[in-house]
Amino acid sequence: MDKNKLVRFFLLSVTLLVYFQIFKPKTKHQPVPPIVKEGVQAKPVNDLAKTPFMDLTHGEKKDITVENEFFKIILSTEGGAIKNVLLKQYKDKHGQPLVLLDHKTSNMGLSFYYKQALVETKNLYFQTTANASYKLQETEEAKIIFRLVVNASQYLEQSFEFTGNSYKINYTWTAVGMEKYMGKQSTACFLWDMDMKDIESDTKSDVAKSTINYYLSNEAFDSLKTNSTKLEEKKLRVPIKWISIKQRFFSSAIIASNVFASGKVSLDPILDQDGVTKSAKLSLRLSKEDKSKGHGSYTFFFGPNDYNILRKVTKGFQQNLPLGWVIVRFVNQGLIIPLFTFLEKYFSNYGLIICFLVIILKLLLAPLSYKSFISMAKIKLLKPELDNIKAKYGNDLQKVQAEQMMLYRELNINPLSGAVPILLQMPILLAIFNFLPNALSLRQARFFWASDLSTHDSILTLPFSIPVYGDHVSLFTILMVISTMLYTWSSSQGGNTEGPMKILSYIMPISVMFVLNSFPAGLSFYYFISNIVSCLQQLVTKYFVNEEELKAKLISKQKRGKQGLTASFQKRVTAFIQHNKSKEQ
């Protein structure tokens, strides 16, 4: 094939490709098939026209307001459900009353199939004889009943019971003559879709701690990933006791008196919608027992993630407040939270509460700190001896270590005894690290220049963002780093830490500064005060500890140790000789 034919073939091919690309027939988008629920065959799109529920898709909309000490709830005949939840004792990031959910961000209700149609009560109109508003005091109660009337002998009733001093709402549904709709063999579910509102000043931290928690009938607790940037879905095949749409400081939950048979949950981060952080979807299958009885009983909880409140709701519900691993959680529940709650009774300034918390914990740990200080002081006094050993044996590290251990044994000193008390203090340190960032009391609490101790304090906003560090400067974090370096310097005076290890002890606080710069100001302030108190504690201990007297005791021990070693050696030699003589005889 000559060159001209190749060119013509190439041009013809390009022309055909362009033609088919421009004039190709447009494909019609097929509708997405409905999701097949577990154990149920696929149903066609929703069509209520041939069902008795068609007439219930319109009706009179009536709102009922129920207000108690803690919240203001709005219910509606449209769906016969909760449409709005306002928590009276809290404000959102704009200083307005905190609306946890509203009709735009939340919808809930029962669902079931009938004659190829999906019936969802959230789209139907109920009837009620309730008053327009209720204001409850202390132990006063109110019961709101909504009825979905199919005919004279068939209806679905939903009731909500309130008390004046509780974050809980008792919810029940009762089906009369509805066996063919919600009977034992039907697939009936409780559906709840909720977009989590952007209510915190630190949106990033709120997003990082928002998730769906669930507690199963086998007492297993779990949750969806909090840090995923993609849709998270999970099928729960074990019966469910309760499930919570948990934000950083608040939770919206439903608790079954019996169980939900199974469920499917999903969590979707919303990155392009103002006022919303994540979207949660719950699909919970009603148990066969409830369907056979035609009655289900549940409890809603809308309230703060406060440990003292959560632990009274139901079994395992306090786990909505993350307090760390088992040992750390035990320290938080048994020591930190009771102590923090006690201080709250007498002080309203949370900066002062943190100061007193530090002082009390330091006093409790004083015996361990004293023991650690004495151990380190002994090792400091031995520094000349240790230096002589290093000079004598040079680069023979094995010999140096052997001689050092011999010296420690002579003086009855355990070189690790100074580290053991520090390790024993670690559970408290970790407990504080888990508790303060999740402490509801620090939310919007002011102290000095920090307008909110539950988020970072910023004295300067940078025109750019530094990786890991962020785009702001936290003064409490800087003070924490300076105090840490001061304490490190004070502790290392006269010590035997040299070379890279000594440099590393000063580099570490600077590295920590990058991490803690975006952490809550309350946590950085706690570490700052803790370092200051540790420095003072060290000065007081030095004042009362006579180093010359301690040195004299060490010399005395060394002499006794050498004598003891000699006597022990002689004893072993004598025993060896006697043993050989007995063999010869």
Image: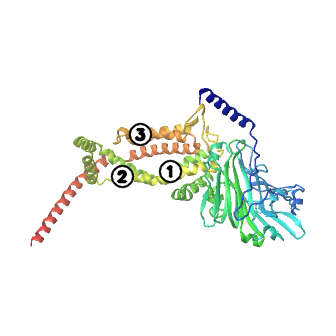
User: What residue is disc 2 on?
Assistant: 416
Residue on which disc 3 sits: 504
* Secondary structure state at the residue bearing disc 2: loop
Q: Judge left or right: residue 523 versus residue 581.
A: right
Q: Mark 1 — residue?
A: 429
The single residue placed furthest to the top in the displayed view is 4
Residue neighbourhood size for the residue with mark 1, other residues' Cα within 10 Å, grouped as few (<14), some (14–19), many (≥20):
some
Report the amino acid beneath label 3.
Leu
User: What percent of the width, then of the height, locates residue 344?
Assistant: 62, 52
Q: Are marks 3 and 1 in contact (CB under 8 Å)?
A: no
User: In the rendered structure, which disc, 3 or 1, sits on the residue that comes first in sequence?
Assistant: 1
Name the image quarter holding the N terminus: top right
Quarter of the figure with residue 492:
top left
Residue 336 visible, this orientation: yes
Rendered position, 370 above or below 38: above
Disc 1 marks which amino acid? Leu
